[in-house]
Image: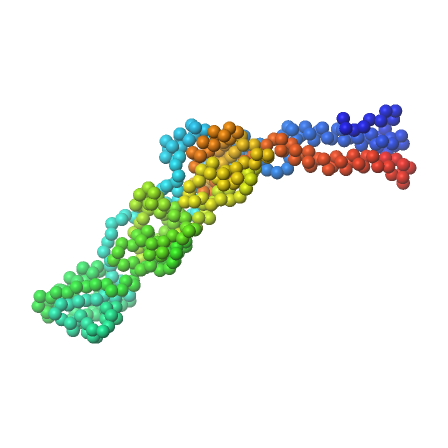
Amino acid sequence: MWLRHCPGQAATSWGKPGNTHGRGWKAWLALVIPIGLILSLSACAVAPGTTASGMRDTSSIPLPVIQDDQLTAANISVRPITAELIIQQLNNGIGAFPGRAAAAQTQVMGAALPDFGLQHQDYRLGPGDIISVIVWDHPELTIPAGSFRSAEQAGTLVAEDGTIFYPYVGVIEVAGMTVRELRQVLIRHLSRVIERVQLDVRVVSFRSKRVYVVGEVASPGIQAIDDIPMTLLEAVNRAGGFSEQADHGNVLLTRDGATYRVNVQALYEDGDITQNPLLQHGDIVNVLDSQFNKIFVLGEVRNPGSYVMNRRRATLAEVLSDAGFVDQDRSDPGWIFVMRDEEGGQPRLYHLNAKSPDALLLAERFHLQPRDIVYVDVADIVRFNRVIANIQPTWSLLNTVSGVRYPLFGGRQ
């Protein structure tokens, strides 16, 4: 016992004559200090900082979960990361790097992409397009304004009402026609004044249909739809391709007031051609940045913080390595947690016991998803030392006060 006992003195209360050594204070300290130590050893109730000691088997707080198609609050179980879990994920097709399903794991609103079909349709004329009609052996119809004008300058403009005027034919409505259909219409009308009509129709300026490509591309802006099939990948390539910050697995396509998520990375890696839909007039393609693909590494690691997943590829072992691995002086590698909020707001908790180095082989096979939280718990002895560090200043102060004499009070302690 570090509190001195002074024999020969009465065990009087503090402040009474005869208690010159303040045994009342020391007796009080002798009672408080062990209580504090017992609290720190039992449940570390007074330990500062964050700890996961309360979520060994289940979550320490209720979380929003879906039960019986209803959103409710409940404690969820902590699933250990074992070989059986890895095998189960592989059998369910979710144990590899996210491919087609990657877009469904991002924190961005938008419905899954339906199958719009990939059948190409011929370009249909619309207001603003400029067409060129070539009638063989009749230059007065082909280039009426001279031979030094460009095809676009000498072409025929489709008016706002979707009509054009052509000699010997008059005003005809061409909006919605293909070039082939317009050619047949002109042949039928001109055959009344020209024998054996031979003509060709070309679109020299595509201006009626356009899509908008914005976000993380080299040259965002308007892309005109022409006779080449305008798929989503074609539009991105015409905009200069993806930038370095682009998220290939999370491209938003807005059409007719609805927004869909497109995973171009699945097209690259899995050959999923449904992720390359044909675009229509007025579509908006928004390439999001990769900041949504962050993983948060917290707790007793050397470099806690947020880390961006490169092309949605990250394992638990990889992010622990990027964070400098666990702090060998403060962490408890037996309690490494992965907290995940899946699609629909369904939370998941996973636990890895990495006290043995070969457990990192399991960590390498456990693939993370965007917005996962990795937490490394603190060691029990560190929590105990933090309690002692907080109690020691108070104990030192009280111990000092108990040995001070006050002359104003007759020399009493």
Q: Residue furthest right?
A: 410
What residue is shown at x 64% (from left), y 37% (from top)? 48
Relative horizontal placement of residue 174, taking residue 254 as reference (left or right): left
Q: Nearer the viewer, residue 250 or 113?
A: 250
Q: Which residue is nearer to you in this view: 408 or 367?
A: 367
Q: Nearer the viewer, residue 107 or 302?
A: 302
Where, by quadrant of the figure, is residue 218 drawn?
bottom left
In the image, residue 188 sits, relative to residue 326, either above or below, namely below
Please state, as top left, top right, bottom left or bottom right, where the C terminus lies in the image: top right
Q: Is any atom of residue 37 visible in this view?
A: yes
Where does the image place residue 173, in percent across and percent down from the top left?
22, 65
Q: Position of residue 318 (x, y in %)?
A: 46, 38
Q: Residue at x 72, y 35 (%)?
A: 392
Q: Is residue 257 visible?
A: no
x 80%, y 32%: residue: 25
The percent position of residue 1, horizontal first and vertical second, equals: 76, 26
Which of 208/408 is in front? 408
Q: Quarter-wise, where is residue 221 in the image? A: bottom left
